[in-house]
Image (cartoon, rainbow, N blue to C red):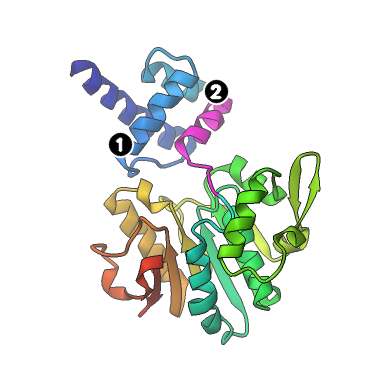
Amino acid sequence: MIIERNTDIEIRLLIEAIYLKYSYDFRDYSGASIKRRVLHAVRQFDCATVSALQERVLHDPGVFMQLLQYLTIPVSEMFRDPEHFLALRREVVPHLKTWPSIKIWIAGCSTGEEVYSMAILLREEGLLERTILYATDINPSSLEKAKQGIYSLPSMREYTENYQKAGGLRAFSDYYTAAYGNAILDSSLRENVTFADHSLATDSVFSETQLVSCRNVLIYFNKGLQDRAFGLFHESLCHRGFLVLGSKETLDFSAYSERFEPLCRPERIYRKL
């Protein structure tokens, strides 16, 4: 029990040290989630204690950038939860078509799969050319991979199935070229995409948008940080704009629950009141 309490204290000190040294704020992330990731990192870095890891992080920025890969969750897939994208196509796209120009913010874009999924959907609906996509994340390595748009060829089989279930209108292979065991996505899909470093914990709103997508990010935040993120999304969205969340996330019981109405509750699609 004493050892576990000491570990909890060490983790709090590590997270505070990261904030003070590198301005990355994990202080309001879910305690259980952060603890699990930090302890995994301790083993991977072959450190005896969290304090030993903290010493390395404070004195070597390179170690911190490696640790950042454990503290964030760079895991995604294209057209993840296909029924979600099918609902976007059927319920949201008709509304988006009423705007002469569209801005979409994909918050916590990770390695870019969500961005390219959205770009493909928009292209098939004739909207991509008049849309600006903002793709943000706090992990520079994830953003760099997202910019490249290169994914493993074996993963394309699963992505193809997702795309088809999501109401895809073409052959999914039309959107990538196979080379050296990888799939290189059509570069035109990211012509209207701006990739940028942005933290939901510390940064502010940067543009008015018609749609904000933040899926499978808020589950790692405590309630206070979730409410901060909802506040940013509410401020960013134009009148009657759309907010889409992950399958395990909800606006219910948040400070902003009465400022949105569910458009498609099962798929966590909301509209600003």
**Label 2: element kind:** loop
Res 176 visible: yes
Furthest residue to the bottom?
A: 98
Secondary structure of the magenta portion, mostly? helix
Question: Which quadrant of the rendered structure holds the C terminus?
Answer: bottom left
Residue 60, disc:
2
| Residue 65 belongs to magenta span | yes
Q: Residues within 10 Å of mark 2 (few under 14, many from 20)?
A: few
Q: Position of residue 193 (x, y in %)?
A: 66, 62
Q: Amino acid at mark 2?
A: Asp
Q: Which residue type does callout 1 highlight?
A: Ala
Does 133 appear above or below 156?
Answer: below
Q: Indicate the secondary structure of the residue bearing disc 1.
A: helix
Residue shown at the point (55%, 53%) measured from the top left: 109
Q: Which mark is residue 32?
A: 1
Q: Which residues are drawn in magenta? A: 61-76
- Specify the farthest residue to the left: 1
Whether label 1 touches label 2, CB < 8 Å: no
Report the front residue among 47 and 120.
120
Quadrant assignment, res 186 = bottom right
Residue 30 located within the stretch drawn in magenta: no
Q: For this rendering, which residue is in front, 118 or 16?
A: 118
In the depicted structure, whether residue 224 falls above or below residue 103: above
Residue at 48%, 78% in the rendered image: 91
For the point 45% across and 57% down, the residue is 215
